[in-house]
Each structure stands twice: as C-alpha cells, then as structure tokens.
Amino acid sequence: MNIKFDVKDVLTGLTEFGTKMNAAIRIYAETASKDFESHAKRNRPWTDRTGRARQGLTGYVTPHGANWRINIAHTVDYGLWLEYARNKKYAILEPTVRLKSEEVLQGLKKLVL
C-alpha cells in the first residue's frame, strides 16, 4: 500500500491558517482598543468642563513587526498634563492599560488555543 503525501498542500494550509489567524488577532486587538477607549472615557478621574478631553480619548491599533500593538491616547494638547501633573491625579491611560491588559491577554489565549 502506497500513501502519497504532498507537502505543498500542508504548507499552503499553514500559510492560509497564519493569514487568517493574523487577521483574527488584528480584529481582536481593534475590539480591545475600543474597550480601552470606552473604559477610559467612562472612568476618567477629572470633571469635564468642555468634554474635549473625554471625547479625545482614543483607542487604536498599529502594526508592530509581525504583531499588533493596542494603543490608547489623548488627542488634546493638555492630555500630557492630565496624565502627569499633580502626582498623576487625573491619569487615565496607564491605569486603563494596567486594568485591561490581563483581560486582553486572557481573551487572546482563548482565541489562539
């Protein structure tokens, strides 16, 4: 009994799997970035005066080599002041990342395993 096995099909399948997995991870990262953004907007420690700082909190994803990086940032020029002045009393970016990172990693584990 002869069994023929064409490795090209396996390699093609692995390549397709890698492409699909990368797309799934990117979509997951985009969803997580919006979760970071929503959390930061809901839990900001400052009182809105104009609403610009809250509205300017934004989560987004950028490619980082073969990986995806989840970002959260201020778009107002005084965002730096909110994050670092007064012993970080009004900081929301770092606290959000610290709080949500483990949740994101656990979700990613479920996605790839």
Image (tube, rainbow, N blue to C red):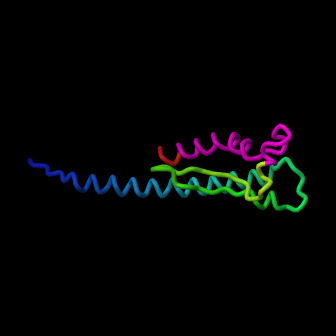
In the orientation shown, which residue stands out farthest toward the top? 87
Among the 4 quarters of the image, the one containing residue 84: top right
**Residue at the (52%, 54%) spot, across then down:** 63
In the image, the segment drawn in magenta is 81-109
Percent across and percent down for residue 6 are: 19, 53
108 on left or right of 8: right
Percent across and percent down for residue 18 are: 39, 53
The verdict on residue 92 being magenta is: yes
Percent across and percent down for residue 98 are: 69, 40
Front one among 19 and 47: 47
39 on left or right of 65: right
Percent across and percent down for residue 101 are: 64, 42
**Residue at the (21%, 51%) spot, across then down:** 7
Front one among 1 and 79: 79
Q: Main secondary structure of the magenta part?
A: helix
The verdict on residue 75 being magenta is: no
Q: Is residue 88 depicted above or below 34 in this figure?
A: above
In the orientation shown, which residue stands out farthest toward the left? 1
**Residue at the (73%, 55%) spot, across then down:** 74
Q: How many marks?
A: 0
72 on left or right of 113: right
